[in-house]
Amino acid sequence: MSVRWIDQAEPGVRQFTPYQPGKSLAELERTTAVGNAIKLASNENPRGPSPQVMAAVSKALTDLNRYPDGHALTFRLAEHLGLTADRLVLGNGSNDVLDLVARVFLGPDRSAVVSAHCFLVYPIVVALAGAGLTEVAAKDYGHDLEAMRKAVDETTGVVFVANPNNPTGTWVTHEEIKHFLDELPEQVILVLDEAYCEYMDTSNYPDSMALLKEYDNLVITRTFSKVYGMASVRVGYAVANAEIADLLNRARQPFNVNGLALEAAQAALDDKDYVAESIRLNKSGLKQLEAGLSQLELAYIPTHANFLTFSLSSRRVEAADVYQAMLAQGVIVRPVANYRMPDHLRVSVGLPEENDRFLVALKKVLEGG
Ligand SMILES: *Cc1c(COP(=O)(O)O)cnc(C)c1O
C-alpha cells in the first residue's frame, strides 16, 4: 500500500466535507432501541406520495427494460411554466442541475459567490468543479445581496441564492432580486434556487419566470422533492435562456432522469389537489410549530418554507445535546452546526400529530418531566 489515493484525487475533492443527509428512520432504529420514531429532518413532504404518482410509477414498471425519454416531461413542464421547452434542463434532483451549472460555468480559474449559512450543496458542486468560493457574511441569517454584489469580481462565474434559503428559511423579495440583477455584471450567472417556492404565500416573493424574460443571466432551479412529495424519486430542473439551457444539456448525462421518475413527475404536475393540500397542511403546521416554540420561549427564524430553524441560545443547553436527547425520544430533527449555526436546530413541518410529538418531546428534553 504505497499509494495514498487522497493525494491522487483532485484538490477540490480532497478538501470538501461530503453532504450529510438527515438521519433516516431506518438508521435510528438500527442503531438504538428507539421504535416508532418520526423524521422531521429533511424537509420532506410528510403526507406520503400522491396516489396518482404511485399509480403512474406502477404503470411505468412494464417499461423498465427501455431507456428513458425525457421529452414528454420537458414539454409538460414547459406548458406548466408557460415557456418553450428549449429553456428547460432536467436533473436527477435539482442538486444534479446545480452541479451542471458549476461544471459548465465554473472551473479552476473561476469562483462562485454564496452567503454564509447557504445550502451546503453549493460549496460541494463548486469544489468539484475545482473553482474558488467567496462566502459573504449573512445579515440576520439571510442573504446580504448588497454585500454579495460587492463580492463579485472578475473571477466570479456564478452567484448562488436559495430563495428561501435552507437551513435559515430567509427569503429575498422581487424588488431585491431585480435590483441585484440590475447591478450584476451581465456575464455572471445568478442561480435562484426555488426548491420551496410553492410554499411562499407572500406577495413580494419574486416572479422569477417574469424576471427570466428580462435577464439573460438568470438560472432558476426547482424540484419535485418537496411540495410534490417525491424526494426519493429524484427529479428537479433548471429554467434559463435557451443558450444556457443548451450548454447545460450538453453537459448532462443523456439518461440522468430515470423512466419511473419521468412518469412520476408528470403525474405529480397533474395532481393539483395534492399540492394544494400539502401547502395548506404546511401553513397550519408552521403555525402549530411557531406557537409551540414561542410557548417554550425559543426564538425561531421567520419563514414560509416547510421547516423552522430555532435557537437554543436562550437556554443553558447545547443544541447538539438537545438533538441527541430528541433522538432518544424518537424524534429526528436536523443539527445545523455544519452550517455554522451551532446554537440552532432545524425541524421540518410534519403532520399535525408529528408536530405535536416534536413539541412534547422538546418540552420534556428542555424542562424534564
Ligand atoms: C431540498 C433542497 C433542494 C432539493 O434538492 P433535490 O436534489 O431536488 O432533492 C434544493 N435546494 C435547496 C436549498 C433545498 O433545500
Image (cartoon, rainbow, N blue to C red):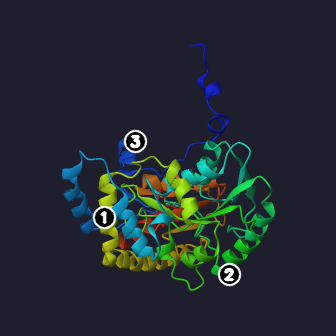
Q: Position of residue 283 (x, y in %)?
A: 45, 79
Three-letter amino acid code at the position of disc 1: Pro
Residue at image position (64%, 52%) is 105
State the mark number for residue 194: none
**Dividing the image into 4 quarters, which one contains the N terminus?**
top right
Secondary structure under tag 3 reads helix
**Sequence order check, earlier mark of 3 and 1:** 3
> Mark 2 packing: few (<14 Cα in 10 Å), some, or many (20+)?
few
> CB under 8 Å between callouts 3 and 2?
no
**Sequence order check, earlier mark of 1 and 2:** 1
Q: Position of residue 341 (x, y in %)?
A: 65, 58
The answer to whether residue 154 is left or right of residue 201 is right
Q: Is residue 316 above or below residue 66?
A: below
Q: Position of residue 247 (x, y in %)?
A: 56, 54
Secondary structure under tag 2 reads helix
Secondary structure under tag 1 reads loop
Based on the displayed image, in which of its 4 quarters is residue 169 positioned?
Answer: bottom right
For the question of whether residue 364 can be seen, the reply is no
User: In front of the other: label 3 or label 1?
Assistant: 1
User: In front of the other: label 3 or label 2?
Assistant: 2
Based on the displayed image, in which of its 4 quarters is residue 167 positioned?
Answer: bottom right
Three-letter amino acid code at the position of disc 3: Thr
Q: Nearer the viewer, residue 113 or 27?
A: 113
> Mark 1 packing: few (<14 Cα in 10 Å), some, or many (20+)?
some
- Disc 1 beta carbon < 8 A from ligand 1? no
Q: Is residue 272 above or below residue 267?
A: below
Q: Nearer the viewer, residue 230 or 28?
A: 230
State the mark number for residue 49: 1
Residue under pointer 3: 31
Three-letter amino acid code at the position of disc 2: Glu
Residue under pointer 2: 175
Residue at image position (44%, 61%) is 40
